[in-house]
Image (cartoon, grey):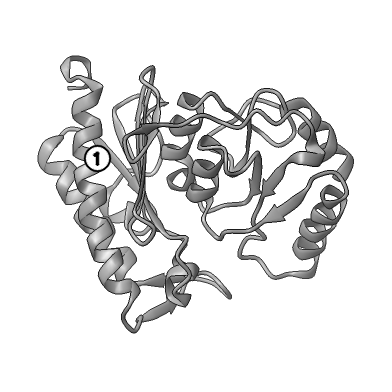
Amino acid sequence: MAANVPLSHFLATAVDAAKKAGQVIRNGFYQTKNVQHKGQVDLVTETDKACEELVFNHLKQHYPTHKFIGEETTAAYGATELTDEPTWIVDPLDGTTNFVHGFPFVCVSIGLTIGKVPTVGVVYNPIMEELFTGVLGEGAFLNGNPIHVSSKDELVNCLLATEVGTKRDKLTIDATTNKINSLLFKVRSIRMSGSCAMNLCGIACGRLDLMYEIGYGGAWDVAAGIVIIQEAGGLVFDPSGKDFDITVTRIAAANPLIKDSFVDAYQQAE
């Protein structure tokens, strides 16, 4: 299927699906939320579930033979591990906690991997009306305009995004905040938007210079953003400096000029 379909076709379908889900997110954003706890601070809403179903149904109609990996209902769809088959990897609502609080960093993230390589990425924030898209070899765009990573080459001028994650045991919190303390002496400032996908897009369009996150939910948080960053001239890697592995929940991203300095600073902060 993937061999004879142009990538622009996959992109158009993903954008349609994202806009449909975006409408549901937008409608739910201004209403009272029905919230369930997945963990101590990890939340899931009816909107998460509705969006995932909507996106998968839309994609399945077009590509019935493709595989699907999603945050909320992977078990129901049968796919859990990434194969070489064309696979849609979807986070129907990244930033659920933001959504519940009415904080506008929420998005739907739709990525397509072919041969395990992230190939098409769509991240849509329906509250801020931002549609980020990327297609392998064809560039990255925000609302149709080309985007590029920043050209900062000194840490002291960089804005760094990270997240504290959902675990609240003392060991994890201390490790997380100690690292942030250490990095705060090196960079201009730190941001926590509450959405991994939005952080990745922030790197791609140059509003952020660096990001890292350890222990995010899974491939659905990053599959789309990776394509968008790489097509915007950025690098995606393991925070240690090693190659990025989509099966491990550790990610960092930066422009090529600042990667090495960041990896050094990160290692000193360990």
Q: Is residue 231 visible?
A: yes
User: Which of these two is toward me, 115 or 186?
Assistant: 186
**Circle 1 residue:** 14
> Horizontal placement of 128 versus 27: left or right?
right
Asked which quadrant contains residue 249, the reply is: top right
**Amino acid at the residue labelled 1:** Ala
> Horizontal placement of 183 versus 119: left or right?
right
Give residue 145's position: percent from left, percent from top. 36, 33
Q: Secondary structure at mark 1?
A: helix
> Horizontal placement of 59 versus 270: left or right?
left
Asked which quadrant contains residue 234, the reply is: top right
* Residue drawn where x is 79% and y is 54% of the image: 180
* Residue drawn where x is 66% and y is 33% of the image: 238
Give residue 135's position: percent from left, percent from top. 35, 26
Question: Does residue 206 lie above or below 20 as drawn?
Answer: above
* Residue drawn where x is 33% and y is 64% of the image: 48
